[in-house]
Structure formats: structure tokens, C-alpha cells
């Protein structure tokens, strides 16, 4: 890993840390006193009862400018993705591509493959229906009309732990808590792997609504217990996968003039991908003689037919960070574990992240985490620790890629403004805040880079836990930073 810090810079960082991150600046600078007064007022009035950690440092020197409980550990939520992304860029590289490979074994005679077809996954979150169709067409081009063997999913690149620690039972149906396997698919270019899209629309009053699955229902089952009702009545539709089953339960009333869309997770991405692939094979005119699908490793003697590669990591970071995609975060963690530690597990990947942090002189004792997405409530870190990360990654060769992946305040384009596109629209902050959002039950966070009214650049982190509805207050705090700095 690259280390770009001169001995002078490291001496300065040590000096700052020994001073408690430079809190003496608050007593000397009038603008910091004004900032302290305005932020304290917001915290007292709008964040009462919550735990708050706020830090601001100079982007150029790393000098601490403002500190409100800056050393206090708080749940970071999706601000965890800041260190996950940094480690992934360093370990995997900007040009890393995920691969999915198609193999066959056995012999082909008169259009009949007396052998197996293997789909070997390496965690590609961008694998979609059209890719599986290309695989089917590649088999057809080989002259295969019938598979008299097995269709096999090889997901051995990752371990069998589909869910990261800390996923609550009530979350498992939803896209932000999707299971992770090495052979998975996404329904569209948001790349929410391990999910399908369920659309529900009204039919005749009194009848069950119409249900559509995108791209395929696969091994999932719809249990439609809903009812179409008159326009103007309440829309009470719920769409959830029943816990640890393949059943998607649709309940409630849907007004005839309304629709409902939900991203629903699969029970097991590998088996769902295989059922999709089997359906596509049939559509392409390839018969499969067996009545079940299989999971196993690809033998070394198998013949490679086709490889599908994802976009490079530097491009994948846009939907990942702009939309705060948990599935991609979890996949990156397991991939780092596999590439660096030869074990595609969350635990192995988190060790790699910790090693990366140490390599750029972060104090990893300040970081407690059990996933890389921020979903776990067991994660904790202080605002100064996040600010230190954001300061140090500026010296990396890939920093521009990292910076460009951050949501931009008030930018209306979805893949530019991301999760900040409808926030911080004030002239003080619009287009001047580049930051990662975070949200869990009772947790709201925002950390990144901002330009003050003076034109000077700063790094900031605002972390709040045990307080619902804190987003508005956080935005007011950031506006005060922009105004006073």
C-alpha cells in the first residue's frame, strides 16, 4: 500500500493528536467562537437527548478547527462506506472488474451435451438478465440444444454466510439487507444485487391486484392476499418476503388508480440466479432434462465458454456511493478478503480494511465495526476519526475517483447528487458539500468535504445517534459551518 506522508506531516499529525486535535483554536479564532455558539444552539434545541459528535478540520493542514464531542464514538451508519471504499480502491485498484464465467464439461454429440454447465461467480453485483441470456446464446452457438447433465452454480468464491452480522429479522426482506453470494443478479442498473422488483397495480374493484416480477420470479413464490379498492381509499399494500422462506406475501388494499413498487430480497441469490438461467435457456431453445439445479465447484477440466466482466471499480463506485448501496459494500468486503486473505468472508475482509487503516496511520482503536456497509448497530467511530480518514486519503493516487463518488449537495441528477440531491439547497451549501450520508433507526450521519464562505476548504463529520429525525438539524449545522468558515 502506498504511503505518501513525509516525516514532517507525520510529526504534525502526532502534534495535533497530542493537543486533542487542536481544540485550543476555538479559544483564539472569533469565527470558531461564532460557529460554536450557533452549533451549540442547534444541538440544544433540536438534538436534545441524542449523542452528538462533530469535528471540522482544515483540508490542507489537517489542523482541528472545531470540536463538539469529536472523540466520542457514535454509530456511523453508511459513513462506514468511506473506509470500505478507500480500502477497496487501495487493495483491488480502480480497474478491478468482477467476473462471471460460463463453463461446460463432458461431450457434445448431435446437439446433446452429455455433461454439465457451470456458472462460476466472483460476486459481480452487475450481473443481470441480459448477461444470462448472452451465456445461453453462447451455449447455443456451441451447438448445444439439450443439456443431459447438470446446471451448476459455482459460488465458492465467497463463504456461505449470506447475511452480515447485525441484520435484524424485520430487515431481511428489503434491498438494503440483501443476502450476499458469489453468484448473484441485480434487477436494474442501481445494482441492488440479491433482489427482484415487485410491481403491484389495481385491477377490478374487489379483485386481487396484478403482480409483476422483474426480471424473473425464479424460485420465489407470490402469495397475493391483497385487494383492489375504490379510488380515494387508503393504500395499505405491503410487499414482504416471509422470514427465511421463498414466499413473497402481498397484503392490504390498493386503490384502483394506484400502484406499489418494492425491491424484495431473495432467500438465496445463487439458487435464484440458476432458476433464472434455466428459464432463459428454455426461452433460447435449450432443453434441460433434470428437475433440479446444483451448487458445486467448477472442475479444472471444464471448458471455458464465455466470461462476463463488470465495469471497472472506479465506475461502479458511482452507483455504490451515490446511492449508498449496501450490497456492493458487502461484496467489496468479501472480495477484499478473498483477494488479500484467500477467504471470501466478511471477517476476512474486515481484517483487510483494518490493515489498510493502519497503513495510512489511522488509529484503528477508534474504529469498531462488524460490516463494511454500516448496517450494523454494533459499528462505532468518532467524528475526528472519520475526519482523519478523509484527510489522509487525499494523498492517495486514486483520491479523485474517491472524491467524485461522493454525493454533491443539491445536484438534481440522481447519479451526481445521489442521497444529497434534495438536501442542503441553500446557496451557502448547494454544490459546495461533497459528503457521504448515513441513516439507521435513530442514527443520522454526514461526513465529507465543504467549501466555506471564505473559499477555504474543510473536512467535516457530524454523527448523531439515539435521536430520530436528526437530518434537518445536521443540515442546519453544516450550513452554519459553511457560513462561518
Image (spheres, rainbow, N blue to C red):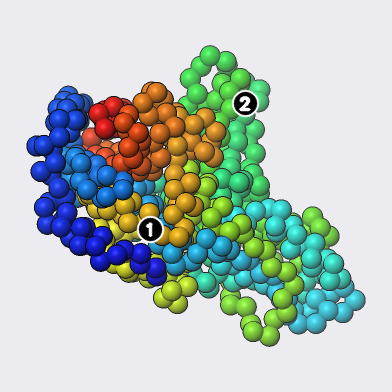
Residue 304 or residue 80, whichever sits in front? 80
Residue drawn at (31%, 46%) of the image: 59
Disc number for residue 270: none
Return the residue nearer the eye: 122 or 280: 122
- In the displayed structure, 447 sits above or below 143; it is above
What's the CA distance linking mark 2 and mark 1? 55 Å
Q: Residue 179, percent across and down?
A: 47, 56
Does any portion of residue 122 appear in the rendered image? Answer: yes
Instruction: Report which quarter residue 281 is drawn in.
Output: bottom right
Quarter holding the N terminus is bottom left
- Closer mark to the observer between disc 2 and disc 1: 1
**What residue did someone put label 2 on?**
202
Label 1, on which residue?
395
Q: Is residue 321 above or below residue 184?
A: above
Of the image marks 2 and 1, the number of the one nearer the N terminus? 2
* Secondary element type, mark 2: loop
Q: Residues within 10 Å of mark 1 (few under 14, many from 20)?
A: some
Q: Residue furthest top?
A: 232
Quadrant in which the C terminus is drawn: top left
Task: Report the side of 369 relative to 176 (left or right).
Answer: left
**Direction from residue 434 to residue 128 in the image, left or right:** right
Residue 225 seen in this snapshot: no
Amino acid at each position: 500500500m502506498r504511503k505518501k506522508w513525509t516525516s514532517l506531516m507525520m510529526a504534525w499529525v502526532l502534534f495535533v493528536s497530542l493537543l486533542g486535535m487542536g481544540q485550543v483554536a476555538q479559544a483564539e479564532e472569533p469565527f470558531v467562537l461564532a460557529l460554536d455558539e450557533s452549533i451549540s444552539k442547534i444541538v440544544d434545541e433540536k438534538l436534545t437527548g441524542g449523542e452528538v459528535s462533530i469535528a471540522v478540520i482544515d483540508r490542507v493542514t489537517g489542523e482541528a478547527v472545531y470540536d463538539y464531542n469529536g472523540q466520542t464514538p457514535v454509530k456511523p451508519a453508511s459513513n462506514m462506506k468511506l473506509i470500505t471504499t478507500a480500502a477497496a480502491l487501495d487493495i483491488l485498484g480502480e480497474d478491478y472488474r468482477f467476473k462471471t464465467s460460463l463453463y461446460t464439461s463432458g461431450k457434445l454429440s448431435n446437439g446433446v451435451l452429455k455433461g454439465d454447465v457451470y456458472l462460476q461467480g466472483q460476486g459481480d453485483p452487475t450481473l443481470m438478465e441480459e448477461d444470462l441470456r448472452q451465456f445461453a446464446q453462447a451455449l447455443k452457438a456451441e451447438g448445444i440444444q439439450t443439456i443431459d447433465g447438470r446446471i451448476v452454480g459455482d459460488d465458492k468464491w465467497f463463504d456461505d454466510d449470506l447475511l452480515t452480522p447485525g441484520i435484524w429479522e424485520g430487515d431481511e426482506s428489503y434491498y438494503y439487507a440483501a443476502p450476499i453470494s458469489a453468484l448473484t443478479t441485480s434487477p436494474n442498473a442501481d445494482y441492488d444485487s440479491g433482489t427482484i422488483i415487485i410491481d403491484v397495480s389495481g385491477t377490478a374493484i374487489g379483485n386481487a391486484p396484478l403482480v409483476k416480477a422483474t426480471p424473473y420470479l425464479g424460485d420465489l413464490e407470490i402469495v397475493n392476499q391483497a385487494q383492489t379498492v375504490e379510488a380515494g381509499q387508503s393504500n395499505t399494500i405491503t410487499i414482504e418476503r416471509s422470514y427465511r422462506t421463498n414466499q413473497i406475501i402481498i397484503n392490504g388494499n390498493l386503490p384502483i388508480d394506484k400502484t406499489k413498487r418494492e425491491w424484495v430480497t431473495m432467500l438465496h441469490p445463487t439458487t435464484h440466479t440458476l432458476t433464472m438461467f434455466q428459464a432463459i435457456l428454455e426461452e433460447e431453445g435449450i432443453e434441460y432434462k433434470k428437475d433440479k439445479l446444483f451448487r458445486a465447484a467448477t472442475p479444472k477440466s471444464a471448458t471455458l465458454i464465455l466470461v462476463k466482466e463488470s465495469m471497472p471499480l472506479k465506475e461502479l463506485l458511482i452507483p455504490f456511493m451515490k446511492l449508498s448501496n449496501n450490497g456492493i459494500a458487502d461484496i467489496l468486503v468479501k472480495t477484499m478478503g478473498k483477494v488479500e486473505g484467500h477467504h471470501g468472508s466478511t471477517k476476512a475482509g474486515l481484517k483487510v480494511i483494518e490493515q489498510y487503516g493502519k497503513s495510512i496511520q489511522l488509529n484503528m482503536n477508534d474504529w469498531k465495526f462488524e460490516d463494511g456497509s454500516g448496517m450494523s448497530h454494533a459499528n462505532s467511530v468518532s467524528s475526528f476519526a472519520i475526519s482523519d480518514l478523509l484527510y489522509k486519503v487525499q494523498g492517495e493516487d486514486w483520491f479523485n475517483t474517491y472524491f467524485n463518488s461522493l454525493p454533491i449537495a443539491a445536484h438534481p441528477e440522481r447519479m451526481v447528487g445521489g442521497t444529497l440531491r434534495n438536501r442542503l439547497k441553500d446557496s451557502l451549501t448547494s454544490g459546495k458539500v461533497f459528503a457521504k450520508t448515513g441513516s439507521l433507526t435513530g442514527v443520522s450521519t454526514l461526513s465529507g468535504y465543504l467549501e466555506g464562505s471564505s473559499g477555504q476548504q474543510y473536512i467535516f463529520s457530524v454523527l448523531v445517534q439515539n435521536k430520530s429525525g436528526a437530518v434537518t438539524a445536521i443540515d442546519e449545522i453544516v450550513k452554519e459551518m459553511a457560513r462561518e468558515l
